[in-house]
Each structure stands twice: as C-alpha cells, then as structure tokens.
Amino acid sequence: MQGGRSATIPRLTRLYDVGGPLPWLRSQRAAGTGMAGTDQRHTRRSGNAMGSGEKTKRKRARAEWSDRGPAKDAVGLDSPQAVTIHTPTEAEQERDTLHGARRVGRSDVAGHVARISAALHPHQSPHVSLLEDLAKEVAAGRRGGKGTDAVAAATARCLDEAAVGTDAAGRWALDEGAAWSLAWLVRSKHPGAAGLVERLAAEGEAAAAALRSGDLAGGPFVVTLLGLFCLSVGALKEDVEAVLAADLAATTAADGAPKAGPAVAFITRVLAWTRVRAAAESSGFGLPWESATDARWKGSCVAALRLLGDRGRVPGRGGPEALDASPLLKILAAADSPPLCRTAAAVKGQSHSAPVGKTVPRDSVTEGGTVAVLRTGWGRGGVRLLLDFSAPRQQLEIAVGDRLVVAGEWGWSVEADGVPLLPTGPWTVCCFESDAKASFLEIVAPLPGGLQAERQIVLLPRDRVLILTDSITDAGACLPASGRPDRIAYRSHLPLAEAGASREAETRELRLKVGERQAWRVLPLALPEWRVATAAGGLDEDGDVLRLRGEGQGGRYSFPVWFDLDPDRSDLPLTWRPLSVADQRQNLKAHEAVGFRVQVGLEQWLLYRALDTPRNRTLLGCNVACEFLVGRLRRSGEVSRTLEIE
C-alpha cells in the first residue's frame, strides 16, 4: 500500500470530538447526519449510568456556554466554538491498523450514498442510477454472504464508470459513494475490499491533482477518502486546508462578500465549498480549514443568500439557473441566529409579503469592497441588484424573482470638448446609505482636469422605484468656468438579459418586458417627455441593449434614468417634467443643479441633485440644502423626504 503501511487493507483512523455545541450550526446528531452507530451507543451507556437528577458533561458544557452567551462574528452571526479534531498518534495508528477500520453503520452509509446521488443534476442520469443502486444494495446488505457480494459488485460498477466517465462532477460523485460503501465493506472484512480500495486510491490521486489545480468538484471525495481511510493520495489534511483557504481568499473579502461577479459564478463557488465542508464533517475529516477561514465561509453563505431569487433559485436569463441551492438554504435554516433562519425561510418560501421579525440586512456594501448588492426585500417577486466595479468596466445585474432583466457591462463614456475622458484611478464607494425606505449607493472615479465621474444607484423598496444616474462634476472644487470644458458628451448602455424593450410612439418612455406578464417603465428624466420636442440626447432600444446619450454645457452634467418596477402601475398614465431650481431668486442652470417631478397615476415624486457646492435652494416650493433628495409629493403639496444626502 502507499504511504509505507504494511496492512493489506487501509484502515480508518480519524476520530473527532466536539467539545461544545456549535451555536451557528446545529449538531449533526440533532440533524440525523452523524455516525449514529457509535454516538447512539455512547448516549445509551451514559444514560444508564446517570442518575435522574445529574447532568452529563455534555449538558453541563452546554449550560456553561449558554451562560456566557454566543459571540458575534463580523457578519453578525453566532461564531462557532472550537471544534477539537483528534489527530491520531503513531501508537493509535498502529492500533487501528491491527484492529481495522472505524465502525460505520450500514444505514448511515446508505444515507450518505443516497445524499450524493440526490445532489447530482438530472442530466447525469447514468451516475444517478449507479449511486441509487449502490444505496439500495447497502441498505439491503448484511455482513457476510451474498449481501456484501452485491455491495462489492455495485461499488465496482461505480468505479468502472468513474474511470471512463468524461463528466468530472459525476466521476467524483461516484468515487465518493464508493468510498462510503468501501468503508463498510472493509469493516465487514469482505475479501474483495482490498482490490477495490487500491482502485479508489488511484482515483484519489486524480482528484487531489484536480483540487490542487482549482477544480473543487473532487473536493468532497478527497476529504471523504482522507476522513475514512489511512490513504496517502497526494493530499494531506494540511494540503487540502491550504488549497481551500486560498480559494476562499481569492474569491471573497474578509467578511465573505464576493470580490467580483457574476452572481451565478459566486453562488456556484459557495455551493462547492459547502459540499466540501459537509463531506469533511460527515466523514470524520473535521473542518477542512482553519477557524478564520470558516468565518469567511459563513459570510459567503450569507452573501450568496442575498443573491438568490424566488424559492431559493438562482436568477438566470429567461428563468432560473440549473443550480440546486437547497444544501445552502438547509444549512442557513439550521442556524442558531433567528434573523438568519427567518431570512432563509423567506427566500425559500412563496410569500410576497416581507417576513415578520428581524432579518439579515438586505443590502451589502463592504468597506473597501468592489461589489455591492441591493434588494427591495426578502419576499417573493423582489428585485435584486448587483454592481461589480472591481474593473474599469462595471458589470451590472438586475433581477426580479428568479429572472435576470439586466446582465452585463454597464457601459459608460464621456467626451469633454471632443476629447475622451478616461478614469485616472479606480472606482470607489463615495457614499452608501440603507434603511427601510431607501438604499443609496454612489461610486466615483477621478477624471483628468479635476473632474469626477459619479454613478448613483437609488432603490426605493416601498415605492418600487429604481434610479440609475451618471454625473460629471468637479468633485465640489467649484472650478471656474475657464477651468471646465464647455461641452460634455455622454454615452452609456445597459445590457438586457432578453430582447424585450419597446418604445412609446409619442413619448420617450420605454417599456421593458419582464417575464411573460410584467413590464417596467423606463423614463430618461434628462430629456423632454414628448418626442416632438427637441432633445440633446436620446434613449433607444437596440436589440438586447438600451443606449443612452446626452449633451450638456458648462462642464457638469447629470443623466438620471427612472425605472418604475411596480407592474400594477404599468398601465397608469404618467408624466415627467424638469423643474426650475432657484437660488436667491435666480434660476440656476443645468450644470449647477437639476430637479425633476415624476407622476404615475395619482402618485408623485420629487428628485433633486446639486452638481456644484450644495447650498440653500428652492424647487417646487421645497427648500433644500443638500446634495441629493428624493421624496414623495403629498396631496397638500408638501414633500415627504424619502432620502436626503448631505
């Protein structure tokens, strides 16, 4: 055998002991996924020896932990207590070599193989059938005789298919199922187990090589093999921990938030880490990384939860992606954090209303991060927005329910007096605010000549309104007219996930098809409403792209686009108008400040943006001294200020 061991059949040596309960995840025993054979016998022996009024050591430890109260990690979740993983000494390894593999229950093995089969996609039907047959043979088997022969034959078929299969995920799933069945066959002392283990070790070598190259599909098999057997497969526990920790660090920030999009790629990675962690714990490998990495993984689970759509599905083009996020939702639903459990249940459920009680914050913008996630809420039919500004070309996703509406590069270009302006530095978060009524995000990048590019995203959950604004300012420096360009030419485009935009015949309003029955209304507020009016710009549909263009004078410019996300208002009459902004009884020009009024049915909104230094001004009878304001107009004519940025 490899690794210099003299035994004919490799032996299982890893033992693990949980010194205290995990507050973030419920114990495997409570969930019914642990090694029931040994744990239940231990519990019965302890119970028989215990008096009716006594406490076991486990109960006493739990009571002491509850008195201290759970600690909170960076994302506000209960941090796990230390998990003690026993590392066998040389004497223990020799003892295990002489006395055989650790006892694994037949029903447990059948359950693990069935779980592996259920995690495969339907298109992998040959692999699913082989694993289902293996689970049935293990469940019906008995030690000795034809029962173990049938299990050995089913295991051999799985290894045969894995050796010739071209699908990596299916191959490693077959190997993982074979590892569990072989652990039982070794304990049953089946004569053919030695040869099967040799074949399994060869597969382990290939899986370890794939894991080192960054392919996490074989991770569950590798940790299962290392957890169940004393096999040298080119990957020690420390090697696996290093590879997984490096992958997590490359993909996520310190709090687990994604470093880049798209959402489907990040969720796929989180699900892969989750599968490896679950396989490591169930096989006795222990945590596959250090505690700091485990905290980062927990944060990534919460970040992935924010990206899920209706019924826990991953939004995609034309419908949900073929990704099963149920393992992630199951783990989050088992958390000891009530807000997290409540949020996971709301995402998985079918209710349109918001969950009752405290939930996980719906928005996420990490300090120093390069990805922002905004949501209207956790109920069904909610709108989710992801902005990736890690590169000069930002990537934008807007999803409703389980369907992507906008997906791709949010293009942007500016010319000053005919000269293209390119950012001279990275995009960074300038301002972020979030409460029950509104979410506000502004990212900025420096431009030549003392100018600054600004992109604002305003999401009003209760009003179901989204405002995307591009602006060119002098960053509050109040450059003199001679120091600013005379003419600003602006271009932008929004990539649609599906070609479904149509324009109105008489106005510049666009209708964006969302699914089969819904439509969003898109209003270019910087342009006149009626097409007969002369406009220095436009908003047009070009297949699966919305193209925006505008021109401004005075060296500053702002182009807000209003999205009405409420399908119940899609047939109501609407109008929008630019407003005069006055300062000391003088009307300001568009390069100093802009204001707009939007009306849909009987509902009206006011939007204001200062492009120079903010000061006390008036529009529509409302005094403002801020840089940005959005609010609703009441029937009395007063403005109810939804969001105000100083």
Image (cartoon, helix red, strand yellow):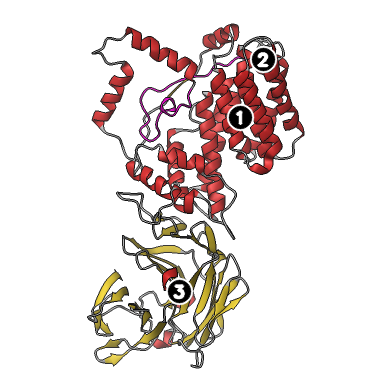
In the image, what residue type sits under mark 2? Answer: Thr
Q: Position of residue 363 (x, y in %)?
A: 39, 56
Closest to the observer, 97 or 598: 598
Question: Is 568 within the magenta?
Answer: no
Question: Which residue position holds label 3?
Answer: 570
Q: Residue at x 28, y 92 (%)?
A: 586
Q: Nearer the viewer, mark 1 or mark 3?
A: 3
Circles 2 and 1: CB atoms closer than 8 Å: no
Disc nearer the start of the sequence (2/3): 2
Closest to the observer, 521 or 139: 139
Image quarter of the C terminus? bottom left
Q: How many marks?
A: 3
Q: Main secondary structure of the magenta part?
A: loop
**Magenta region:** 10-34
What label does residue 222 carry, if any?
1
Disc nearer the start of the sequence (1/3): 1
State the image quarter where residue 65 is shown.
Answer: top left
Q: Residue at x 50, y 39 (%)?
A: 327
Q: Is residue 117 above or below residue 474?
A: above
